[in-house]
Image: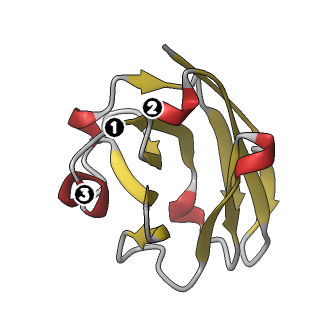
Amino acid sequence: QVQLMESGGGSVQAGGALRLSCAAAGYTHSANCIAWFRQVPGKAREGVAAIYTDADGDTPYYAASVKGRFTISQDNAKNTVYLNLSSLKPEDTAMYSCAADRVPWAACRDIQAGVFDYWGQGTQVTVSS
């Protein structure tokens, strides 16, 4: 079992920045992929970023919509994954959730929501124009 808790959401103006945190507890070393997703009511969940860990280290992956603006990283000592959001746009407004699990590399690379069993409750990000 892995427990996840997000924090860091808030309201910012367009062009602003936020840092989201995803703190993990439990059997955390069983997970090789931690990802961030976002969802707006009435729309499908969107994979935003993921970080895949193997013997070669950590590899980040990003959705095209956020590449160059968002950065995912992790602090293994703190069992925390961060998502730095910059150059925020109103269309980035959503509930952001993190997920973790042991998944195939391709599923992590493609940030596929369906392969994750462990999810946090989410943190709201609101960007005003």
Q: CA distance from mark 1 to mark 2?
A: 6 Å
Looking at the picture, tell me which residue is in the foreground, 80 or 53: 53
Asked whether residue 116 appears in the rendered view, the answer is: yes
Question: Between residues 25 and 88, which one lies in front from this camera angle?
Answer: 25
Q: Is residue 75 left or right of residue 46?
A: right
Judge by depth and name the residue closer to the eye, 83 or 69.
83
Q: Is residue 102 left or right of residue 19?
A: left
- Dot 1 corresponds to which residue? 102
The answer to whether residue 38 is above or below residue 114 is below
Q: CA distance from mark 1 to mark 3?
A: 9 Å
> Could you tell me which secondary element the residue under label 2 belongs to?
helix
Quadrant of the drawing holding the C terminus: bottom right
Indicate which disc, 1 or 2, sits on the residue closer to the N terminus: 2
Residue 129: tell me if it is visible. Answer: no
Q: On the image, numbered disc 3 is attached to which residue?
A: 105
Q: Residue at x 77, y 58 (%)?
A: 19
Q: Earlier in the sequence, mark 2 or mark 3?
A: 2
Q: Which residue is mark 2?
A: 30
Label 3 amino acid? Trp
For disc 2, the neighbor class at 10 Å (few under 14, some 14 to 19, many from 20) is: few
Is 75 located above or below residue 96 in the figure? below
The reply to whether dot 1 and dot 2 touch (C-beta < 8 Å) is yes
Alpha-carbon distance for marks 2 and 3? 14 Å
Q: Amino acid at mark 1?
A: Arg
